[in-house]
Amino acid sequence: MTSMNDLPLNKLQFYSTAPYPCSYLPEQDARSQVATPAHIINTQVYSRLVESGFRRSGSFTYRPHCERCKACIPVRIDVASFSPNRTQRKVWRNHSSLVATALPLRFLPDHYELYKRYQSARHSSGGMDEDSQEQFSHFLLHSNVQTYMVEFREHAVLKMVSIIDELQDGLSSVYTFFEPEDHQASYGVYNVLWQVDHCLRAGLKHLYLGYLIHACRKMSYKSQFKALEGFKEGRWRQIEKPTPAPSHLNIAPTTQSEPSESV
């Protein structure tokens, strides 16, 4: 694994933030290491940063840098070794009526309304349920790298939106929000499966899922996916044992269009 010292990032600077309340673990402080300046972090540079555990929120590129806590584990799926379990195959079949359409980043009113419903139902105490259009756009629609969004509709009704970064060796799942009132649905699981399938069909090696935090229910779901690798002590290590996998999942999703200048 290439170390940070080997990366061609001589124009970047890295600094540590002051401690701030952790968003995931109660009564704990967190710190982040931030890469700057943002305007020179293009897709090529960002791909190398992601390989070393970084993540982005808007134009803010960071990774956890806590002194005493190592709970945040950057994770990715080795898509060639991935095989869905029985529950995931059922989710894939149950949501096969979803129609996926890839779009370039832009503000769409129904996306914003879905985002507000999702935040209000799932993250009401985090403050994001009060995000304005400007905050929503800054968080999800501002990017210096190759990014597109995929909307999922069922009978023309919007059910889910996913923001995805294109990397040199795979895809990075930035953020996904979905209809919270469909209580019997498993949109989040389906979305990961859809992105794995998209990687397979595009010949990409990895799907990056951000951070796994075993002690946080909202972040621990990632451990249910096989062929999972975690970035620990400067290298990617296997977390979940891979199993033989097909070249693509058995039920292909329907994609209406591809994002212009993105895929």
Image (cartoon, helix red, strand yellow):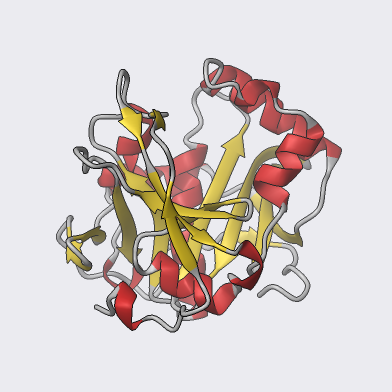
- Find residue 6 and report its horizontal and vertical position in percent: 32, 83
Q: Nearer the viewer, residue 32 or 191?
A: 32
Task: Name the quadrant of the N terminus.
Answer: bottom left
Measuring 72% from the left and 38% from the top, which residue is drawn there?
Answer: 136
Q: Nearer the viewer, residue 198 or 210?
A: 210
Measuring 48% from the left and 46% from the top, which residue is drawn there?
Answer: 190
Measuring 75% from the left and 66% from the top, which residue is drawn there?
Answer: 257
Task: Name the quadrant of the C terminus.
Answer: bottom right
Q: Is residue 152 visible?
A: no
- Find residue 83 and report its horizontal and vertical position in percent: 29, 61
Counting every numbered tag in the picture gives 0
Q: Give the vertical position of 80 relative to 254 (above or below).
A: below
- Find residue 169 and report its horizontal and vertical position in percent: 44, 77
Quarter location, residue 222: top left
Tell whether 103 sits left or right of 14. Answer: right
Q: Give the vertical position of 82 relative to 5 (above or below).
A: above
Q: Nearer the viewer, residue 261 or 244?
A: 261
Q: Nearer the viewer, residue 98 or 146?
A: 146
Quarter location, residue 205: bottom left
Tell whether 10 sits left or right of 162. Answer: left
Quarter location, residue 137: top right
Tell whether 260 sits left or right of 69. Answer: right
Q: Is residue 51 visible?
A: yes
